[in-house]
C-alpha cells in the first residue's frame, strides 16, 4: 500500500489520473500481484484510488467517506460512545459555523440569501405537517458554506452532517422539536439578512441547543 502511495507522489499524479496496469504497478513498486491487488482494495476503501471496472484504476478525488463511515459506526456502538461521538460532531459543526460567521455574511449574495430563505420556509411547512426535512437541512448547511469557495470545508460540513443524521435518530425527540428546528434555521437566515456576525453566532448556538439537550438527556437516562 505504501509503495503505491509513494508511486503516486513520486510521479506527481493528480486526482483523476490513470494509474499503470497491475503488471506495471508490480514492477514499479517491486511487489507481487496479490500484494498489489490487496493494496488497491485498501486504497480504494480509503478513496485514495478509484477502481473503474473495464477502465482501470485512477487516483481518487478528495473524499471524506472513510471518515464518515468510521465516525458513524463509532456513534452507533452501544453505550456512552454514541453520545460522546455525537457531542463532538455537534461541537465541530457549531465551531465551524460560528467561526466563519463574519465571512459568511460578507460573501453571501442575494441569490444565496434567497435560497436559504426558501429552504427555511420549506422546513417550516414540513414541520407544521410533522414531516421530516433531513435533506432540506443538509442543503441548508451546505448552501451556508458554499459561497466561501472552500471544497474541503464543504466536504467537512457534509461529512459531519451525515454522521449527525445517522446517529441522531438514536436520541429521543418530541414532535415539537421539528418546529423548533425550523424556527432556529429561520433565525439563522434573519441574522444573515441583518448582517451582524454576533447575532449570527448566537443564532447558530441556539440552533444546536436542542440536540445538545437531547444528548445530555440521553446521558442522564
Image: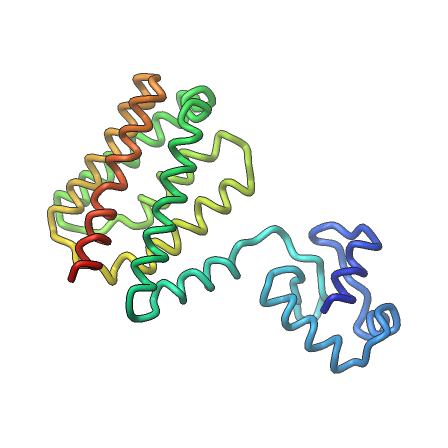
Q: How many marks?
A: 0
Q: Is residue 198 left or right of residue 2?
A: left
Q: Quadrant of the N terminus?
A: bottom right
* Colour convention: rainbow
204, above or below 45, in the image? above
Q: Residue at x 74, y 61 (%)?
A: 5
Give the camera-side residue of 113 and 7.
7
The image quarter containing residue 27 is bottom right
Q: Residue at x 32, y 60 (%)?
A: 167
Q: Residue 85: horizontal and vertical position, in percent?
A: 36, 57
Residue occupying the far right of the picture: 27
Q: Is residue 151 left or right of residue 133?
A: right
The image quarter containing residue 99 is top left
Residue 151 visible somewhere in the drawing:
yes
Residue 56 visible somewhere in the drawing:
no
Q: Quadrant of the C terminus?
A: bottom left
Q: Residue at x 83, y 74 (%)?
A: 26
Q: Residue at x 34, y 53 (%)?
A: 164
Q: Is residue 6 left or right of residue 197?
A: right
86, above or below 99, in the image? below
The image quarter containing residue 187 is top left
Residue occupying the far top of the picture: 195
Q: Residue 147: horizontal and vertical position, in percent?
A: 48, 30
Amino acid at each position: 500500500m505504501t509503495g503505491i502511495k509513494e508511486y503516486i507522489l513520486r510521479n506527481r499524479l493528480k486526482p483523476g489520473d490513470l494509474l499503470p496496469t497491475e503488471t506495471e504497478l508490480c514492477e514499479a513498486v517491486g511487489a507481487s500481484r496479490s500484494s498489489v491487488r490487496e493494496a488497491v482494495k485498501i486504497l480504494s476503501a480509503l478513496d485514495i484510488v478509484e477502481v473503474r471496472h473495464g477502465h482501470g484504476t485512477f487516483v481518487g478525488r478528495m473524499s471524506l467517506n472513510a471518515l464518515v463511515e468510521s465516525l458513524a459506526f463509532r456513534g452507533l456502538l452501544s453505550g456512552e460512545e454514541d453520545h460522546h461521538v455525537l457531542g463532538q460532531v455537534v461541537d465541530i459543526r457549531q465551531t465551524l459555523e460560528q467561526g466563519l460567521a463574519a465571512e459568511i455574511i460578507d460573501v453571501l449574495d442575494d441569490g444565496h440569501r434567497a435560497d436559504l430563505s426558501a429552504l427555511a420556509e420549506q422546513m417550516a411547512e414540513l414541520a407544521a405537517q410533522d414531516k421530516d426535512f433531513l435533506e432540506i437541512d443538509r442543503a441548508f448547511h451546505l448552501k451556508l458554506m458554499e459561497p466561501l469557495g472552500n471544497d474541503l470545508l464543504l466536504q467537512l460540513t457534509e461529512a459531519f452532517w451525515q454522521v449527525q443524521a445517522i446517529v441522531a435518530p438514536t436520541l429521543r425527540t418530541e414532535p415539537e422539536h421539528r418546529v423548533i428546528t425550523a424556527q432556529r434555521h429561520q433565525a439563522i437566515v434573519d441574522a444573515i439578512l441583518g448582517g451582524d456576525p454576533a447575532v449570527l453566532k448566537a443564532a447558530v448556538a441556539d440552533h444546536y441547543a436542542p440536540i445538545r439537550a437531547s444528548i445530555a438527556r440521553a446521558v442522564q437516562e
